[in-house]
Amino acid sequence: MIEFRESVLKNGIRLVMSRKSEIPNVIINSSFHVGSKDEDPEKTGISHLLEHLMFSGSANILDGKFDEILHANGGESNAFTTQDYTSYYLSIPSSKIELGMWLDSDRLSEFPVNEEGLEIQRKVVLEEKLQVHDNTPYGSLEYESAKRLFHNSGYRWQIIGDEKHIADFTLEDVKKYYEKYYNARNMVLTITGDIDYDDTVNLAEKYYGDINTDGYKIDREYSEVDIKDNSEEDIEDNISLPARFAFYRIPRIGTNEFYTSRLVTVGLSSGESSKVYQELIRKSNISTESFLMSQGMEFDSIFSFNCFLNEGKTIKEASKVMDEIFTELAEKGLSDTDIQKSINKVITSYYLKIQQSLRLASSLSFYKLFFDDCNMINKEVEIFKQITNEEVKNFARKYLFDKKRVVLNYVPKRKVKK
Amino acid sequence: MIDRKIMPIGKVSRDINFPEFKKHTLSNGIKVYFVNDNSYPVTTIRFLFKMGSYNDFFLGKDKFGTATLTAEMLSKGMKNRKALDIAEQIDFTGAMLSSGAGYDASYLMMSCLSNNFDSMFGLTSEMIFEHTFPEDELSSKKEQLVNMLISLQDDGSFLAERVFKTEMYRNTPYQYDPDGYIESINNICTKDLFDFVKNYYTSKNLIIAVVGDFNEDKVLNDIEAKYSSLKSETKTDDYKFINKGKEGTKVYLVEKDDASQTSLHIGHKGIKRNNPDYINVSFLNNLLGGSFTSRINKNLREKNGLTYGARTSFNCKMYSGDFSIETEINLEKTKFAVEEIIKELNDIKDNFVSDIELEETKNYIIGNYPLQLETSNGVSGKLLSMELYNLNKDYYNTFLRNINSITKEDVSYAAKKFLLPDELKIVAAGNVSKLKEQLSKFGEIEIIDKVK
């Protein structure tokens, strides 16, 4: 059981704390309910760019000094942006918790960005896009799959955004976005590690209590249209070996179906005894890397079957085995052994996760932000245990056989001889 | 309202000690380390054998990848059980197993819930004593390795790193990558694996670490019962690393005509792990390019916006080592980036670091150190490297004190002695025609047609 305490600051910031005192450090995690799907279709990538800019200095912290001050005091920081939320975290020796809060909250007390920071980070993000996507084998997968899985909502573009948009953002664009979403009532503050609960509440009130709540009103409307039946396309890429990716749209995080999908990914593709490993890798030598993935999102989630092919093997051979695995899942579900196996794996990962205060803080922020229920951290294993094989079969029939899927076959670019 | 202009500095941190550990030496020489910690119901056991791809070099023929394949094949079949049955048992308990080889060591590692520890300990021991290396499993594993290597040919940073290592360690046992090469992997057969086990999987080479929630007396008894029969006779592979004379800076270019960035890997010779200057060198590295706020990352990313990130490292092996700078950099500005990197190397050689930078680097290392001790994986890894590299048994306990006592003279000494900006191997994978023009000023250019 993870013990935690909650509190709400005067301005509405939801504070979550969990004491864990093996080491003399604390983690401060500030998470905002905003991500790439909330962006203007003409200004994609602004969530992620703003994430970079939050480290460039603020009212009382000179340009570029955020991480310098933090490092100089024994800390470390990072952040990430998803389709649905943006999360900032830092670690610092517990005796310097106030300094950590001061650094983190100063960038929230007033708009922290200036022209110079914007110009530098714009360039850094464009280089990041080259490194992570454009110049990387299979790096366009997020872009290519998102635009085919979604046609209406903000899930249809990739998190890093369009390079033309990134090149054009003005300071005013960033400011508007910041003012709308970086609002006290749109955030969760989670603090884990070597803390005293009462002191932490007081300190949080002191540093975060004056953060803006003006004009808080975020309406999220979500609607999507069906994807095309059995759309299958070849994508040429700078790769030596082909790969096949099958994507499905499945229900949102928190639903029983979504948990079922997670159980299916573990049951079918985790470990060398799994069906996916045995059929695609071990017995047929079709692939060296194949796995299922269930990516949870706020309104719709993405389920995928990823298969990287070995030399000399064809997409046709891979697709036959991949389809058979899902057909069997729809007919028989998972075996009792595979279900038990998955639950045991979930339990082990749970304990390995909570050993780390950083991962503990991130989980608590996530549960608070999307379910308003930190106790989910203690309930998840139980939820997995309740899933029946009937639910597994229903999940497969309903979502994996709906014909509505996007298949992308990555193939080596044809080279023109010079 | 608080006055945000005032930075709350905070008190000095309380000290942290490395977890208390016990060391046992079995009659046949096996070293066993225990850290008992019942905060979580998980236990990690690691077996480390003091041999790795270094030893592949001595196998006579082109057999690079043998150490890796041997370690990965341990779990692929035993006297009475097939690979699939073994995998079933591991997966069913929810345990995590991994094995593999680096340059100096091979490992087998298992993390599991503590109530499964006994059965998992039994299983890992069977892997070490009763493996059968079935032919069909080996050919499947070989195919996986070969395909991974084919796929890595598409990755610019992999190409640049391989060329750097080949040039850096040419004709020495460290030239060859633990993962092997497409041709060499195809040369390996089951007999090679059995021979490798016979020669190197010995009590003299074995170190065991158990960290987590377990019964010390029982586990020590079990280890003695299983492992006291392991033979100690070990093949020794001696190689004399010769210090090459000055060679000057050279540029190596690898064609990746589709690349929109340059994969840059620059470096020169470094030090071995148990060099007494290691702590000064790693401190120097931290400040120069080891973290987000280090000089080189700040220059290339935060000041010039040329990259998503740049890092330096001293890669210290048992008998030798290298210093490397790695980054994916703007194609048009590659020359400028190399100039800036060389400028930074010279600057830290020519000038003392300020008192403030010295103190801040100390705080950074000391403040972040506890996070490395938070998990059983982290603690067991540190114990094993202490034994592997023959470090003082107080190494981790005195680590913070030693960091604290570093002076700017120490940093300057390390920079002057171990940074060699006139002796660089500059490897760039990318658009060769553009890079040729940009990088010719740094030294003689060699175009690498095929990266093995």
Image (tube, rainbow, N blue to C red):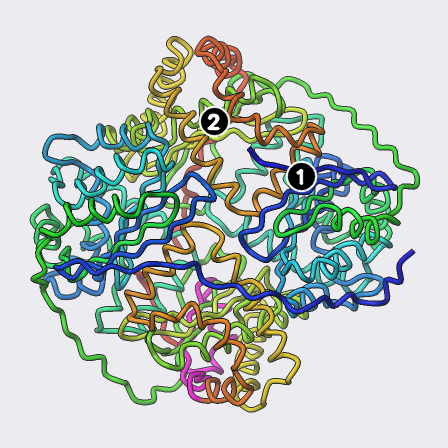
In this picture, residue A207 sits left or right of residue B429: right
Residue A162 visible in the current orientation? no
Q: Earlier in the sequence, mark 1 or mark 2?
A: 2
| Badge 2 amino acid | Ala
Closer to the camera: disc 1 or disc 2?
1
Where is residue B121? Give x, y as percent. Answer: 25, 41
Q: Answer above or below: position of B410 versus B144.
A: below
- Residue topped by disc 2: A246
Residue range highlighted in magenta: B417-444
Where is residue B75? Give x, y as percent. Answer: 21, 40
- Residue topped by disc 1: A365
In this picture, residue A149 sits left or right of residue B377: right
In this picture, residue A385 sits left or right of residue A168: left
Where is residue B447? Give x, y as percent. Answer: 36, 70
Q: Answer above or below: position of B1 versus B77.
A: below
Question: Going 74% across and 49% down the picture, which residue do you hit?
Answer: A200
Q: Nearer the viewer, residue A74 or A180?
A: A74
The C terminus of chain A - image quarter = bottom left
* Number of on-image labels: 2
